[in-house]
Amino acid sequence: MKIRTAADGDLLEVMFLFLREYRETRAAEAGIEIKHADILQKFIWMLKQPEFGAFLVAEAEEDGAIVGYIYGPYRKGWDGNDDIVVWHEVGWYVKKDSRGQGIGLALFKAAEDIVVNAGQASHMTVTTAVGSDHEKLMSKFEAAGFTPLQINFFKKVRET
């Protein structure tokens, strides 16, 4: 497996990975409609933003297919302290048939290396959904040095 910075040519494949995961789980459960053009525009915009600290993909060595990704921006301010700059993961995914091989951890480590070498952020944050594999994910993040801070809940209150 090879971790590298995402390029324009990767965006469609990343978008389809995102849609498969998001559509099959969270969006369908929440009744959210996802439009392909909106997602592609979002990824194109993110790739071009200078404040985006990392947009990485994991490539399978045998065929070069993208099997995972991670992306997120720098954000100024944390816990009321504007002097702290944080790199905030806003999206990551590893294909189901590629899990259990350390790809997710490798993506986070590569993002951390970029953040450290850029010298812009002093902290990283991760958001993960609560689900059937939540406990397993929590233990992996804790083993990688992350500290759990909060759990957010989601409730649909009206039709959109």
Image (tube, grey):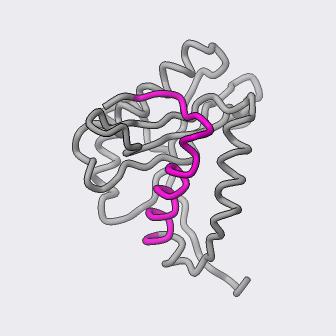
Percent x, y of residue 109: 41, 26
Q: Please, which residue is most extreme toward the bottom here?
A: 159
- Check the image and report above or below for 20 versus 62: below
Q: How many marks?
A: 0
- Check the image and report above or below for 157 versus 81: below
Percent x, y of residue 99: 27, 48
Q: Quadrant of the C terminus?
A: bottom right
Q: Main secondary structure of the magenta part?
A: helix
* Residue depicted at x 69% and y 45%: 44
* Residue depicted at x 41% and y 33%: 107
Q: Please, which residue is most extreme toward the left here?
A: 100
* Residue depicted at x 74% and y 34%: 49
- Check the image and report above or below for 136 versus 50: below
Instruction: Tell me which corner region of the image, top left, top right, bottom left or bottom right, holds residue 87.
Output: top right
Q: Quadrant of the N terminus?
A: top left
- 7 on left or right of 26: right
- 101 on left or right of 114: left
Residue 5 counted in the magenta span: yes
Percent x, y of residue 139: 29, 44
- 56 on left or right of 83: left
Instruction: Tell me which corner region of the image, top left, top right, bottom left or bottom right, holds residue 146.
Output: top left
* Residue depicted at x 47% and y 42%: 69
Residue 33 counted in the magenta span: no
Looking at the picture, tell me which residue is in the foreground, 152 or 52: 52
Give the residues in magenta.
3-25
Percent x, y of residue 39: 65, 58
Looking at the picture, tell me which residue is in the foreground, 50 or 128: 50
